[in-house]
Image (cartoon, rainbow, N blue to C red):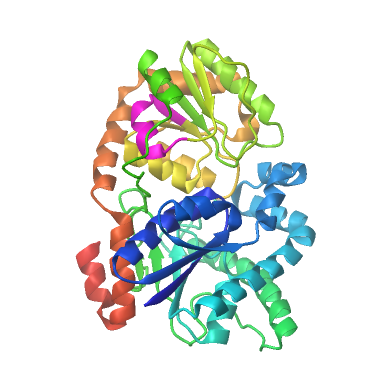
């Protein structure tokens, strides 16, 4: 079967989909991954067929305005404010992104589309081409439940009515701007207007949902519909030929396991201040350090015997060999640390990151998260010392790692998708067997 996979965002929104595409390909499907052009090398290195979408929307994050906006995007209302701040710049780029997705879909003529909600062009493509959709989630953000509030809202514990209301509010506030963008694009092409029902595709069918996170970390809500399946995290394995660089390998062997700092695309509007905070905390604690400068704009400084600064390294090879990971709380990085059994310190910047920071504390693998706008060398030092002096963090991380490693989430997700494609009436039986 021909499958088109649409996703968009930072590496954390893309790398898990590369893992899923590999499993679907192994199952005999013809799979194309469409996402931002900057991730072509990531996909093709794993032999995943790639179609490039525009990078321009991601480029906004690289601007000073984008960085300042991201710093204030904590919780639902923070995200909403950021969306309004950037809407004038973002909307034309989103319309062009819909156009890119349409061109890829016309070229591939898929039998089914699997999509990340950020790639909401899938709704329009589904309706025009009359092909079914499968929604793929990396965070628990869209499938409604009355058991807990949406992750962007505080848990007020005032009743199921409040929980349901938070999910309804998020769905409506996501749906309205997306529908406007899709309708602008549809009018450009002479297509009919979009109703954009978030869980109904262009064929009129209910959209199945495959959730790429672990029930060991987020228990599956009892009131989720039977067509929503929690598979476990989707991990991309390093190739057998892939190794850590000689410099990194030498540094790891020269002394005690270092503290690893990695913030992905998040470094805030003042990356140098973040770097200085890290250096001061390392000096205060007497620890060796490793900084993954990544896409976030942290510039490497002068070489030091107790510090190595590199752009990136494969998480599955690196994280089992560090003492702890200090990071932004992105879903992908959090999952990689959980799988490695590595204690964490979470410094949330925006979006779902505060949720993951709070959840890591609740699971006992991290101390209390520190919001990035409150981060100082002193509170970072205290968090580091609490992990160094608290063996319970590593004990909890090791125990959880064993559960996550046993799940093979990408494989289970591919099995669920096969079940959806072959016989949707069997989903309930599949769900009971798989979860």
* 321 falls in the magenta region: yes
Q: Relative to 195, is 52 above or below?
A: above
The one nearer the camera, 280 or 176, is 280
Q: Nearer the viewer, residue 306 or 392?
A: 306
**From where the camera sits, is residue 161 visible?**
no
| Residue 344 falls inside the magenta stretch | no
| Residue sticking out furthest to the left | 433
Task: Indicate left or right for 77 with 391 as reference.
Answer: right
Is residue 134 in sight in this rendering? Answer: yes
Give the tally of numbered discs.
0
Residue range corresponding to the magenta coloring: 313-325
The x and y percentages for residue 368 are 47, 32
Q: Most extreme residue toward the right, as rendered?
A: 88
User: Is the C terminus in the top left, top right, bottom left or bottom right quadrant?
Assistant: bottom left
Q: Is residue 185 above or below residue 35?
A: below
The image quarter in which residue 107 lies: bottom right
Question: x, y percentage for residue 178?
Answer: 65, 71
**Residue 156: x percent and y percent?**
51, 51
Q: Kindly identify the residue that appears in the image at 70 percent across and 73 percent down.
A: 181
Q: Residue at x 57, y 32 (%)?
A: 293
| Residue 303, percent from left and from top | 57, 15
219 or 284: nearer the viewer: 284
Position of the N terminus by quadrant = bottom left
Report the front residue among 306 and 405.
306
């Amino acid at each position: 079967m021909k499958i088109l996979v649409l996703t968009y965002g930072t590496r954390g929104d893309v790398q898990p989909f590369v893992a899923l595409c590999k499993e679907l390909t192994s199952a005999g499907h013809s799979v194309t991954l469409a996402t931002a052009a900057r991730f072509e090398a990531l996909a093709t290195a794993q032999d995943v067929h790639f179609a490039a979408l525009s990078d321009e929307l991601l480029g906004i994050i690289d601007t000073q305005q984008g960085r300042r906006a991201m710093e204030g995007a904590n919780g639902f209302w923070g995200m909403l404010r950021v969306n309004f701040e950037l809407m004038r710049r973002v909307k034309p780029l989103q319309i062009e992104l819909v156009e890119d997705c349409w061109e890829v879909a016309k070229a591939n003529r898929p039998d089914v589309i699997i999509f990340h909600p950020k790639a909401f062009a899938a709704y329009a493509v589904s309706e025009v081409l009359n092909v079914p959709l499968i929604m793929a989630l990396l965070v628990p953000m869209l499938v409604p439940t009355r058991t807990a509030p949406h992750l962007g809202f505080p848990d007020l514990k005032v009743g199921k009515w409040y929980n349901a209301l938070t999910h309804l509010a998020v769905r409506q506030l996501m749906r309205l701007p997306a529908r406007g963008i899709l309708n602008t694009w549809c009018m450009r092409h002479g297509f009919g207007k979009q109703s954009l029902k978030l869980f109904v595709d262009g064929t009129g069918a209910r959209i199945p949902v495959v959730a790429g996170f672990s029930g060991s970390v987020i228990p599956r809500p009892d009131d989720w519909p039977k067509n929503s399946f929690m598979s476990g995290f989707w991990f991309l394995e390093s190739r057998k030929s892939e190794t850590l660089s000689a410099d990194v390998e030498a540094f790891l062997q020269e002394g005690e396991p270092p503290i690893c700092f990695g913030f992905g695309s998040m470094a805030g509007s003042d990356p140098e201040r973040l770097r200085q905070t890290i250096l001061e905390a390392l000096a205060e604690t007497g620890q060796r350090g490793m900084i993954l400068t990544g896409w976030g704009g942290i510039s490497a400084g002068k070489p030091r015997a107790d510090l190595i600064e590199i752009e990136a390294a494969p998480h599955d090879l690196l994280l089992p060999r560090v003492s702890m990971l200090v990071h932004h709380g992105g879903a992908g990085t959090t999952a990689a640390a959980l799988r490695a059994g590595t204690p964490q310190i979470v410094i949330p910047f925006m979006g779902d990151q505060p949720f993951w920071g709070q959840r890591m504390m609740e699971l006992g693998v991290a101390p209390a998260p520190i919001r990035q706008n409150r981060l100082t060398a002193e509170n970072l030092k205290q968090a580091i010392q609490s992990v160094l002096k608290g063996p319970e963090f590593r004990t909890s991380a090791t125990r959880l790692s064993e559960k996550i490693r046993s799940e093979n989430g990408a494989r289970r997700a591919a099995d669920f998708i096969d079940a959806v494609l072959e016989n949707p009436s069997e989903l309930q039986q599949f769900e009971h067997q798989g979860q």
